[in-house]
Image (cartoon, rainbow, N blue to C red):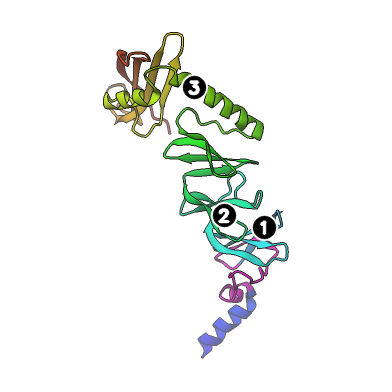
Amino acid sequence: MRIFITILLAVIAHPTLAQKDSIDISVGAQWPFEEAFYRHDGTTTGGLVFSEQKAFICYLGKLGFIDSNKTIVISPQFDFDSGINANRFLKNRAAISLKRKWGIIDTLGNILLPFDYDRLIPYEDYYFIEQDYKWGYLNHDFEVVIPLNSRGMDRLRTNEEVEAYIVDWNRQDSIEYSFPVHKNEVIRKAKRAGYFSKRWEGTGISLNVESAEWTIQNTESKGSTHKGSCAHTNGCIILETSKMVIDASTGKVKQKNKSTSLMPIYE
């Protein structure tokens, strides 16, 4: 009896702990706090930030949304992420993470774009997407305007930048398709010969229009070593650099070579 009274007094003395089991986070319930984050210890932090009359709330690590009346419109169920344009609505859509994969939801929590992407960043009329170390862009109708590729990892920040890049991408594609040997065939050749990274990381592919040559260059780690000059140190990463040149008219391999180098590991 004495233990029970002690526990009861502790709960009364800490009202946030008493609230912990009584907070309703279902759709239609009221968010009872002026802060966005409700933590495991029963405390709250972070002011509410509204965008398009919606503000995110985070209940025990799960993300949801309330409206301007602090009514829960999407119950906390998604991952919380502090990335660019995350956790807010833009044109009645929000980029949301679920189990570390990204998709798009509407203001009612309906899934508009499946959670398939490793990264997804919304801009005014476009979406930057990344999947399996390749990147591209979708338009607002979720149509592919730049397909997933490994040409570069620069994110374009404005509509004008994306639209100019789309024009350049299509121009480059038309040039590449004007040669008998297209990039896809070059990639297949390079993969078969072991000159193309399976994960696309570090592999560069370029077309020299004047010489009609495709060049594939790749640098990737092949493990580590403590031998030789790397002995009695933190060791070295073994880097393999490869280069293959293919004729864009005939598909003939004109050059291929590989070399290794050591990169010291610093703490």
**In front of the other: 20 or 243:** 243
Q: Dominant secondary structure of the magenta stretch?
A: loop
Of the residues shown, which amino acid type is indicated by label 3? Ser
Return the mark for residue 55.
1
User: What residue is shown with label 2?
Assistant: 105
Q: As displayed, is residue 107 above or below residue 4?
A: above
SS class of the residue under badge 3? helix
Which span of residues is magenta-colored? 16-42
Of the residues shown, which amino acid type is indicated by label 2? Ile
Residue at the image position 30 percent from the left and 23 percent from the top = 189
Q: 10 Å neighbourhood of mark 1: few (<14), some, or many (≥20)?
A: many
Pinpoint residue 238: horizontal percent, then vertical percent: 32, 26
Q: Is residue 182 left or right of residue 256?
A: right
Pinpoint residue 95: horizontal percent, then vertical percent: 57, 49
**In front of the other: 6 or 265:** 265
User: What residue is shown with label 3?
Assistant: 174
